[in-house]
Image (cartoon, rainbow, N blue to C red):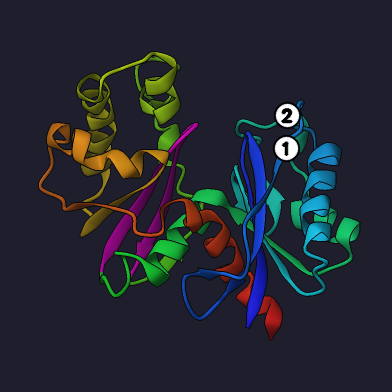
Amino acid sequence: MAILGVDVGGSGIKGVPVNLTKEEYLGERFRLDTPVPREPKAMVETIAQVVKHWDWKGPVGVGFPTVIHRGKALEHGNLDKSWLGVQVDDMISQRIGLPVNVMNDADAAGLAEMEFGVGKGVKGLVVVVTIGTGIGSGVFFNGELIPNFELGQMRYKKKTSIEEYASRRVRLDNDMSFKKWGKRFNKFIQMLSTISQPELIIIGGGASKNLDEYIKYLKTDIPIMAAHTRNHAGIIGAALGARHLLK
């Protein structure tokens, strides 16, 4: 049983069929650059080219980098403002002629980690944090997704969001040491700890592979672990989110 998973990012759009019973791609990921400007028509056309590459005829799951409610974009995130209010699932489905499920990309990554990673079987509240261009978050209770918790949008210092202060892109753009950036990211951990007390925080995204370099600067009693699925998470989770389309 397989679904084509598509991970839509600010720099690239990647897709590959996913085995739904285990953490496994059914081929090599196919990637195209995200068009600039990141407008609906151009991005949907790029998604269609990814689907065409696989000659896919079944359901498609898409992880999308903004708040998604019942397939509609409620924010535009790092994309063009014209995405606001677009019924994303219908727009993609009409272009490719296939059933489509669209969900927030961090929620998708979290779904993969709860199904196949270190979150599997953990009861209570679990927060999966993806650190990349921004800071995304997937929140789960007893393994069930509570969608669209955009914790990276919490305010930090006047009009600045915490992701504008402590994302991986900020570290790379400013050539920060892990010590300096780790202390910044600790501000996010402290804010998260103030509003909730999860059983586990899972770090995913590009910064997950370097967790050992900065975990010492994260001052919390909450267990913190690196994601197991890492770069596979977005695609696998997008496919998992579309399972209902097979019924």
Q: Quadrant of the N terminus?
A: bottom right
Q: Secondary structure at mark 1?
A: loop
Q: Position of residue 80 (x, y in %)?
A: 72, 29
Q: Quadrant of the C terminus?
A: bottom right
Q: Position of residue 147 (x, y in %)?
A: 50, 57
Q: Position of residue 184 (x, y in %)?
A: 26, 24
Residue at 21% from the left image edge and 43% from the top image edge: 193
Q: Does the segment drawn in magenta span residue 138?
A: yes
The answer to whether residue 44 is left or right of residue 232 is: right
Q: Does the segment drawn in magenta span residue 38?
A: no
Residue 38 shows in the view: yes
User: 28 or 169, which lies in front?
Assistant: 28
Residue numbers of the magenta segment = 124-141
Q: Magenta-highlighted stretch: main secondary structure?
A: strand
Q: Which mark is residue 81?
A: 2
Residue at 57% from the left image edge and 51% from the top image edge: 104
